[in-house]
Structure formats: structure tokens, C-alpha cells
């Protein structure tokens, strides 16, 4: 089932939390939703799930418009909220059975679905505990199992690996990638390496607006108009070289490289000629001057620092 938003907008008083956001996600695609705190990620996800009514625009699932009253359409969505609210007095197995009944799973299939979720989310050792007795990592796993128990076509996951240890993160990443082969998956994260490892495509939102979209390799190659140069000036004194490079037009930052005489120069526009000319004027020979591939961190920073 495909997911599409068209000019999605939400206001809270005078603040525009989500501003004309449009994108689409196809079945078999995992899309990462990135942005700084307060950018509008959670509000957008809640509108997709029908939990918050938009002030403008439309959410479409499989071509049908979503609204808070679209109960049958909402059964196609599995949602793991950032806060991950659970009924703490219920044992894990009872909670998952309750979730399955709530979502209309056939009673003859409930036990099988619950068993599948216990295994898929690694809950076997904790399944008889009350959810209030679980560690944060196992609470997160239980919330993910609750979101998946009815086998939804669309998954909306808000920070799904929060609180997990490194081994658990690897397991949940693998689960999300596997689910993404047959489902439509959108998940938010602040861990850029995680987004790059799991996602087919990334959406970056800032101050309620969608500011960048594409595959991780596309975003890195675009550099959002900026450039990173690797420069090596063997004969130049460190302090003089740093002062010269930092003083060039369009320079955002200079970092000392690991090799002798090497520097990483971040620029808002590609400007290799200005580096070469400035070094030549000092009588310094450049042994290396090349355009480096942008890091996803650089792309995120360029997209959101304004």
C-alpha cells in the first residue's frame, strides 16, 4: 500500500509546525525521516496515522484519504510512537493479544501472530513479565511488536531504536530492512549512520518544511551546493596554513587532517581555484587538492542550519 502526503500543514496557534509537506513512499521502500528536534517529524507522523487532524493538505493511503474517522483505513498502519506508551500492568503476551484483538485480527490467528512477534522482536525471555517490569530496551521491542502484531501494510516508526543496546540496534535494523521488502516503512531517527544503513531514501525536514530528499548517495553527491576539499600543503607552517585557509571566501570550516600538512576544507560553494591561487601566492606547493565525498552529517547540517 503506497503512502502519499500532499501539502500537509499543521499549526499550533501562531506556529506553523508542518508547512506544505509533500512526499510519497512506495511498498517495498524504507524511508528515513530526519530533522532536528522540533522540526515537525512527530507531528507529520501523527497526521499520517490519523491521530492528529491536519489544518491543510491530505494524507492518502492506497489512494484513499486519511482522517481521524477513517478507522478501517487506519488498520493498515502500524505505529510506534516516540514515547511508546504501554499498559504496564499487562504481561507482554497479554498486551500483544490485546493489540491483535484491538486491530481486528481473526481470533484463530491471534496466538500465531503473537508467537511470531515474540520471536521476531526477541522477546522470548521476557514474554511473561509485566511491561512495567521491562528494561527500556525490551519496552521498545514490545512497542515494536505491538505495532506489528496485526501485520500492517504501512509502518510508521518514531525513533524505534531508542534505548536499545548496540546488539539490539543491529537486530532491529535488520528486522526493519526485512519488513521493508514487503511493507511501506517510514521511520525517524537522529542516528545518521542508522538512516544510511537502513533506508532506501531520506527525507530531511527543518522548521516544518521538507528541505531535502533523495537516496543517501544522491544527497552526499549533491552536497546541497557545498563542497569538501582535501588539501595537502607539505611545506606550509601549520598556523599559517590554517589562517590562510580559514580566511578564504565561502569557507565554513577547516580541520587538520591526519597526515602531515593535510587539511579538510568545508566550503559553501565549490572553489578549488581560490585555494590553489591563495597557496600559490604564498609560494606553497600543493601536493594534493581533491573534492571529497560529503558526509551525511555535512548534508544534514547544511540543510538544517538556517
Image: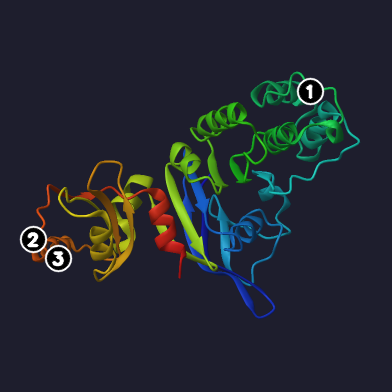
Give the CA separation, mark 3 to mark 1: 64 Å
Q: Is residue 79 above or below residue 97?
A: below
> Where residue 39 sits in the image (x, y, percent)?
57, 63
Q: Residues within 10 Å of mark 1 (few under 14, many from 20)?
A: some
Work out whether mark 2 precedes mark 3 in sequence or the reverse, and give the earlier one: 3
**Residue at the extreme bottom of the image, as rendered:** 14
Give the CA separation, mark 1 to mark 2: 68 Å
Residue shown at 80%/23% (left/top)? Answer: 127
Front residue (pair 233, 151): 233
Q: Residues within 10 Å of mark 3 (few under 14, many from 20)?
A: some
Q: Residues within 10 Å of mark 2 (few under 14, many from 20)?
A: few
The label number, if any, that marks residue 278 in the structure image:
3
> Where residue 150 sits in the image (x, y, percent)?
70, 34
Q: Is residue 108 above or below residue 221?
A: above
Reading the image, the residue beneath label 1 is 126
Front residue (pair 123, 146): 123
Label 2 SS: loop
> Where residue 190 sits in the image (x, y, percent)?
55, 49
Give the CA separation, mark 2 to mark 3: 9 Å
Residue shown at 64%/61% (left/top)? Answer: 43
Q: Which is closer to the viewer, label 1 or label 2?
A: 2
Q: Which is closer to the viewer, label 3 or label 1?
A: 3
Reading the image, the residue beneath label 2 is 283
Amino acid at each position: 500500500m503506497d503512502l502519499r502526503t500532499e501539502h500537509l500543514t499543521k499549526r499550533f496557534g501562531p506556529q506553523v509546525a508542518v508547512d506544505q509537506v509533500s512526499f510519497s513512499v512506495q511498498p517495498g521502500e524504507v524511508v528515513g525521516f530526519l530533522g532536528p528536534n522540533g522540526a515537525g517529524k512527530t507531528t507529520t507522523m501523527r497526521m499520517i496515522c490519523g491521530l492528529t487532524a491536519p489544518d491543510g493538505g491530505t494524507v492518502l493511503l492506497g489512494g484513499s484519504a486519511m482522517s481521524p474517522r477513517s478507522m478501517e483505513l487506519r488498520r493498515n498502519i502500524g505505529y510506534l510512537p516516540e514515547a511508546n506508551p504501554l499498559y504496564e500492568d499487562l504481561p507482554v503476551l497479554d498486551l500483544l493479544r490485546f493489540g491483535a484483538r484491538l486491530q481486528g485480527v481473526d481470533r484463530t490467528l491471534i496466538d500465531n501472530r503473537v508467537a511470531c512477534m515474540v520471536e521476531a522482536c526477541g522477546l522470548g525471555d521476557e514474554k511473561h513479565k509485566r511491561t512495567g517490569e521491562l528494561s527500556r530496551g525490551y519496552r521498545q521491542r514490545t512497542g515494536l511488536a505491538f505495532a506489528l502484531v496485526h501485520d500492517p501494510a504501512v509502518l510508521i516508526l518514531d525513533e524505534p531504536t531508542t534505548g536499545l543496546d548496540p546488539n539490539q540496534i543491529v537486530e532491529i535494523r535488520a528486522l526493519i530492512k526485512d519488513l521493508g521488502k514487503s511493507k511501506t516503512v517510514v521511520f525517524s531517527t537522529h542516528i545518521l549512520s542508522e538512516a544510511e544503513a537502513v533506508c532506501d531514501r531520506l527525507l530531511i525536514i527543518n522548521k516544518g518544511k521538507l528541505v531535502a530528499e533523495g537516496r543517501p548517495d544522491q544527497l552526499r553527491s549533491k552536497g546541497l551546493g557545498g563542497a569538501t576539499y582535501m588539501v595537502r600543503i607539505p611545506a606550509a607552517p601549520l598556523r599559517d596554513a590554517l589562517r590562510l585557509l580559514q580566511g578564504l571566501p565561502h569557507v565554513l570550516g577547516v580541520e587538520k587532517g591526519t597526515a602531515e600538512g593535510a587539511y579538510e576544507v568545508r566550503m559553501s560553494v565549490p572553489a578549488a581555484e581560490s585555494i590553489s591561487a591563495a597557496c600559490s601566492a604564498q609560494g606553497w606547493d600543493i601536493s594534493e587538492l581533491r573534492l571529497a565525498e560529503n558526509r551525511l552529517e555535512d548534508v544534514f547540517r547544511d540543510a538544517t542550519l538556517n
